[in-house]
Image: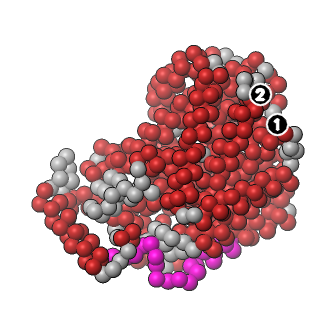
Amino acid sequence: MKDSSNPGNKKLSNVFIYSVIIVALLVIAGVINPERFGAVSGTISNWVSSYFGWYYMIITSGMLFFCIFLVFSPIGKLKLGKPHHEPEFSTRSWLTMLFSAGMGIGMVFYSTSEPIAHYFMPATAEPETEEAMLEAVRATVFHWGAHAWGMYGAVALALAYFQFRKGESGLLSKTLRPILGDRVDGPVGVVIDVLTVFATVVGVAVSLGVGTTQINGGLNYLFGVPINLTMQGVIIGVVTVLFLASAWSGLSKGIKYLSNLNMIMAAILLLAILILGPTMLILNMLPTAAGEYINTFVARTLDAAPMNDQKNDWLQTWTIYYWAWWLSWSPFVGIFIARVSKGRTVREFVMALLLVPTTIGIIWFTVFGVTGIEVASKVPEILDFGPETQLFAIFNEMPISIPLSIVAIILISSFFITSADSATFVLGMQTSHGSLRPAAKIKIVWGIALSSIAYVLLLSGGETGLEALQSAAIIAALPFSFVIIMMILSFYKDANEERKYLGLTLTPNKHRMKEYLTKEEEEYQKQKDAGIDEEDL
């Protein structure tokens, strides 16, 4: 069995060297000529959206339906690990880490700004009507619902399965062994892992950039701090120091505690808005939002609006951007949630991943969305603020506005730290031969790289920094999407063979299962007797 946690090769991996060079070149290019950098990335992004929008719609749908299929498939009975593996984290901590890593900053940033945008500029409905209100909640919930988690789940399943059940290292390239063979150990594997690192860096940097602009917006609204690139650079610098300090404490401590703290603060903020906002309208809208989400799920999933130019433009601005953002986030989130999901069954993993965050998303965006629309309808001046400041402008029209804004800023900062902390671990792991305990120095390098890319994207966007962030996500997602397709095929091929071997149908083949458990127990005992660390077994 391979020791995936502590590979023998202590030299810097080729993946680390090539990835650092690429990221460094991007940072240098962005600093030297930010306007040109932004213009080129915008052009490429528009081309990708125009010619591959249909592709993003299909691939995201395919990954989600694949995960749903696994729930009802005998493959769902397989454990993400060996028979003796038990979950490392409690179910509550596990779910909070999934949610914090998977959404975090974006849920706060878009909590009110996206529903408001859809209400005043809907895809098809008449603006500022009851139908526009329904469309606003419906569209927002759709963007933040099961599709994102289907993408994360497809990547995480393959990683966790091959790492913990098959003994491979935690590199994405190793999940392709069933279809590429030993080529994953050579240059082909390096290319795949470099693509993974690049998508992760860009995807996380987009979120950090979004978080930075909103922290800046909140500080401006509360204390008059100017909104400019200098202040955003200071914010990134301060938060970078904080998340690097968190990274030193280790995965199970720093991220676990921060994730639990995030959920507590998010719950406090959610409850406060529910009570202080239009409570009865929100409560009546909650079942409606859930029903609308379910009722329009298939139609929205497969709608590329080829005959409606207005809706097609809307899809490119919103839906395709989100699908690309989730795709670029999928290696980071997938690797992270695979790491914390050891010992769970495939079925348990998929059901928790699709149902719990989606339910929370419906509640969150309904509460904040309805409140934001109601306040903005009465106070039109709110529309003059950018999306990074709208949340605080809405709080200003409510009781205890300052405490609400302070909690929101702390929550965004904490999500920032959690995401960056998790990302440094993931990047360290991917560039350290798949080690579950990457060196602190490597994590620091990636922490600085993430912050640098985030600032460069803001720099290149000028007054429209958000557009630069969106462009980066759309571009990074395209090449990595092909890797995901291969991962799904590889996982299904191997897992289905395992399923057949164990005789897993509605009921397992008792003889095969007994034989498998005996063999694995003997292997486990043999490695324990050899003195291998319990955590590495």
Residue type highlighted by circle 2:
Asn
Residue 333, horizontal then vertical, whole percent? 53, 54
Please give the name of the residue rendered at 27% of the width and 61% of the height, measured from the top-left corner. 83
**Residue 235 located left or right of residue 362:** right
**Residue 480 located left or right of residue 110:** left
**Which residues, given as a range, are shown in magenta?**
1-22
The residue at the far left in this view is 511
Residue 419 located within the stretch drawn in magenta:
no
Task: Tell whether label 1 touches label 2 (CB within 8 Å).
Answer: yes
Above-or-below relation of 382 to 4: above
Q: In the image, which disc is placed on residue 396?
A: 2
**Residue 34 located left or right of residue 209:** right
Residue 247, horizontal then vertical, whole percent? 60, 63
Quarter in which the N terminus is drawn: bottom left
Does any portion of residue 296 appear in the rendered image?
no
Please give the name of the residue rendered at 63% of the width and 18% of the height, measured from the top-left corner. 278
Label 1: few (<14), some or many (≥20) within 10 Å? some
Residue 320, horizontal then vertical, whole percent? 61, 43
Q: In the image, which disc is placed on residue 221?
A: 1
Tag 1 secondary structure: helix
Label 2: few (<14), some or many (≥20) within 10 Å? some
Please give the name of the residue rendered at 54% of the width and 72% of the height, measured from the top-left corner. 438
Residue type highlighted by circle 1:
Tyr
Tag 2 secondary structure: helix
Q: In the image, which disc is placed on residue 478?
A: none
User: Quick one: 207 or 537, which is closer to the camera?
Assistant: 537
